[in-house]
Amino acid sequence: MKKHLFVIACLALPLAALAANNKGGAKPPAAAASAAAKPASQPASQPARHARTADESRASVQASKQRKSDMGACQKQADDKRLRDVERKQFVAACMSGK
């Protein structure tokens, strides 16, 4: 009986340790080392270039709303013409591009 428990413990403990190391989304040691070796893309003193100002965000939202409105109008025209499938897609694409 003790022999069986010893064998089970010898097999279970390394597996438990391996599972504990990978718990929480930790990277494997090789991946962590390669991530640490990469230099930072921008110094910490410089702000990120992809950050938008409030005015740019508002303009983007307004453009999105206008595009949705235009899309709705083109879809309604396609409904009125009873277009389906490929013809409908071509019509809406042409309508959105202003042709």
Image (cartoon, rainbow, N blue to C red):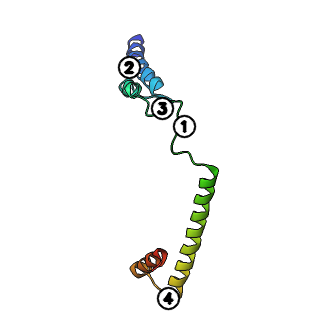
Residue 6 falls left or right of residue 60: left
Up the image or down, 51 lies above or below 81; here it is above
Q: In the rendering, at what x and y percent does residue 71 appear?
A: 54, 73
Considering only order in the chain, which callout, 4 or 3, is on the residue closer to the N terminus? 3
How packed is label 3: few (under 14 Cα within 10 Å), some, or many (20 or more)? few
How packed is label 1: few (under 14 Cα within 10 Å), some, or many (20 or more)? few
Q: Amino acid at mark 3?
A: Gly
Camera-nearest residue between 42 and 32? 42
Q: Amino acid at mark 1?
A: Pro
Q: Secondary structure at mark 3?
A: loop
Q: Secondary structure at mark 4?
A: loop
Up the image or down, 3 lies above or below 52; here it is above
The residues tagged by marks 1 and 3 sit, at their Cα atoms, a distance apart of: 28 Å
Give the residue at mark 2.
11
The residues tagged by marks 4 and 1 sit, at their Cα atoms, a distance apart of: 51 Å
The residues tagged by marks 3 and 2 sit, at their Cα atoms, a distance apart of: 24 Å
Give the residue at mark 4.
81
Q: Secondary structure at mark 1?
A: loop
How packed is label 2: few (under 14 Cα within 10 Å), some, or many (20 or more)? few
2 or 1: mark nearer the eye: 1
Q: In the rendering, at what x and y percent does residue 38 appear?
A: 38, 28
Determine the residue positioned at 49% across, 88% down: 81
The residues tagged by marks 4 and 2 sit, at their Cα atoms, a distance apart of: 71 Å
Q: Which mark is residue 25?
A: 3
Q: Which mark is residue 47?
A: 1
Determine the residue positioned at 42% across, 11% down: 2
